[in-house]
Every structure is written in structure tokens, then in C-alpha cells.
Image: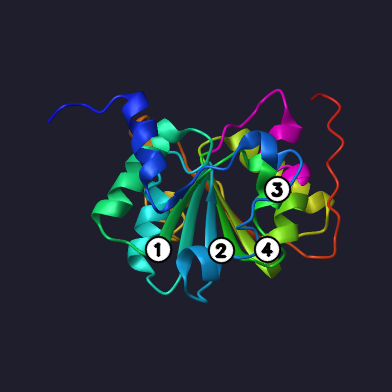
């Protein structure tokens, strides 16, 4: 079977009915029309929406959609070459409760309306060691997420990067948020349930290398503007 090149993948993605690729320039000045209408327009059902940010190859998005047909799942990433794999798998598997969104996460408020998302998964994001405010678990992004989450909506963070894990705990503590669950070693915690046992491509590599996987689950209060910790070293 011939290997599909990057340009061919991009061309295929543009034809996929379950992939949305908004124009980045238009998002600078206006909302995407689907904002606030994902259920009725895209999924055509009233089920809750779960969003995976930085979905990469889409393993979590697709596997969750398989396991929970009564929920809708959206994988969001800007790297379409990786996303193509998950999008193709979802299409071949005839999954009607999964979609993919190729856009920068910085535009998330242009793409989802208030209370439109029930849960957010952040799986092995770039830890941004020199730019903490660009981390997907920084107060900058958490304040964006709370705009679109239902009241008390939850965020899950799975990462092999201990610095990112500790930093996120610091952000939560700074804002008086108690984690619902937190472990610095997921596979020694006894929490490897049906959802947490899903492994991404990168997670498998980290585990083979002997890296520990950390996990955090927390709820975001809708009326609290989160602040960033004062980290003078960064």
C-alpha cells in the first residue's frame, strides 16, 4: 500500500465531512459560524461534548468515541498531518460522534460558545519550558477554557513532563482550586481505569523509555478569573 504524502493528506482532510478547518485570518476578527451550534449543526444530537486539545494523531478522541457512543468528541490541533490518522480511522470505523478541528487553540473562544463543552482533555502537550504562559495549563488558557465549559466542567492533564505537572498544581493552588485527582505516577496509582488506560503514540514511547506519566483532574469555577503564579525564575 502506497504511503500517503503530507500534501495528499491535507487534500483528503479538506473533503472529510467530520473535519473543520476554519480560516485563521477570519478567526482574528470574528467567530466561526459553528460556535454555539456544534450539537445541532455538526453532531445532530443533544449529547455532551468532550474536547481534546493538542490531539496529535487523535488516539484519545477516537478511542473515547468508540467507548462512549452517548457523548460527542472533538480533537483539536493545528497539525493536520498528524490529525489525518485519527480522522481517517474515525471515518473507516463509521463513528458518528467524533469530529476534528484544525485550528490554533488560542482561537478556542471563537469556536465554542459558553457552556458548550463538558470536559477538556490535554494529552502530552508541549511543556513550553521557557514560556510558561503558553502552556496549555497556564492561567491564560484556563481562563479561556472556563468560558466554554459547563459550570464545574472538568479538565484532565496527562503528561510525562514533571515540571509541567508541578507547575499546573502551582497554578491551581494559587487560585484555590483543589485537584479532583492528582498523581505523579499514573501507572503506579491504581487509577488505570478504562479511560486512563488509553495510550497515545507518544505515551507509548515515553513508557518504553521508563518515563513516569503524571495525571491531573480538576474542575474550573465559572466565575473566577485565574491568576498566574509569580515565578521569578521563569
- Circle 3 sits on which residue? 169
Q: Earlier in the sequence, mark 1 or mark 4?
A: 4
1 or 4: mark nearer the eye:
4
Label 1 to label 2: alpha-carbon separation: 29 Å
Q: Residue at x 39, y 53 (%)?
A: 17
Q: Which mark is residue 38?
A: 2
In the image, is 69 to the left or to the right of 21?
A: left
Q: Earlier in the sequence, mark 2 or mark 3?
A: 2
- Circle 1 sits on which residue? 193
Label 2 to label 4: alpha-carbon separation: 14 Å
Furthest toward the left, the residue is 1
Image x and y of residue 41, in percent: 52, 66
Closer to us: 38 or 148? 38
Image x and y of residue 94, in percent: 27, 60
Image x and y of residue 36, in percent: 65, 64
Q: Count residues near mark 2 (Cα–Cα under 10 Å), then give few for <14, some for 14-19, many for 20+.
A: many
Q: Residue at x 64, y 66 (%)?
A: 116
- Circle 4 sits on which residue? 149
Q: Secondary structure at mark 2?
A: helix
- Type of secondary structure dominating the magenta stretch: loop
Q: Which residues are magenta?
A: 125-141
In the image, is 100 to the left or to the right of 221?
A: left
Label 2 to label 3: alpha-carbon separation: 31 Å
Label 3 to label 1: alpha-carbon separation: 22 Å
Q: Earlier in the sequence, mark 3 or mark 1?
A: 3
Q: Is residue 146 magenta?
A: no
Amino acid at each position: 500500500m502506497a504511503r500517503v504524502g503530507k500534501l495528499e493528506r491535507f487534500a483528503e482532510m479538506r473533503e472529510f465531512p467530520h473535519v473543520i478547518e476554519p480560516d485563521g485570518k477570519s478567526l482574528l476578527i470574528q467567530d466561526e459560524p459553528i460556535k454555539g451550534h456544534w450539537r445541532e449543526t455538526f453532531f445532530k444530537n443533544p449529547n455532551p461534548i468532550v474536547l481534546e486539545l493538542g490531539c496529535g494523531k487523535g488516539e484519545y478522541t477516537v478511542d473515547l468515541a468508540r467507548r462512549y457512543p452517548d457523548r460527542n468528541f472533538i480533537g483539536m490541533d493545528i497539525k493536520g498531518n498528524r490529525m489525518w490518522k485519527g480522522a481517517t480511522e474515525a471515518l473507516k470505523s463509521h463513528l458518528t460522534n467524533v469530529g476534528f478541528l484544525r485550528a490554533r487553540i488560542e482561537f478556542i473562544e471563537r469556536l465554542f460558545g459558553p457552556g458548550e463543552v463538558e470536559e477538556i482533555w490535554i494529552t502530552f502537550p508541549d511543556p513550553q519550558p521557557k514560556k510558561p504562559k503558553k502552556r496549555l495549563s497556564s492561567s491564560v488558557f484556563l481562563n479561556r477554557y472556563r468560558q466554554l465549559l459547563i459550570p464545574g466542567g472538568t479538565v484532565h492533564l496527562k503528561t510525562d513532563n514533571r515540571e509541567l505537572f508541578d507547575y499546573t498544581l502551582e497554578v491551581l493552588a494559587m487560585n484555590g482550586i483543589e485537584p479532583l485527582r492528582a498523581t505523579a505516577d499514573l501507572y503506579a496509582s491504581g487509577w488505570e481505569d478504562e479511560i486512563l488506560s488509553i495510550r497515545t503514540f507518544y505515551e507509548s514511547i515515553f513508557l518504553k523509555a521508563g518515563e513516569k506519566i503524571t495525571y491531573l483532574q480538576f474542575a474550573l469555577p465559572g466565575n473566577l478569573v485565574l491568576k498566574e503564579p509569580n515565578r521569578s525564575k521563569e
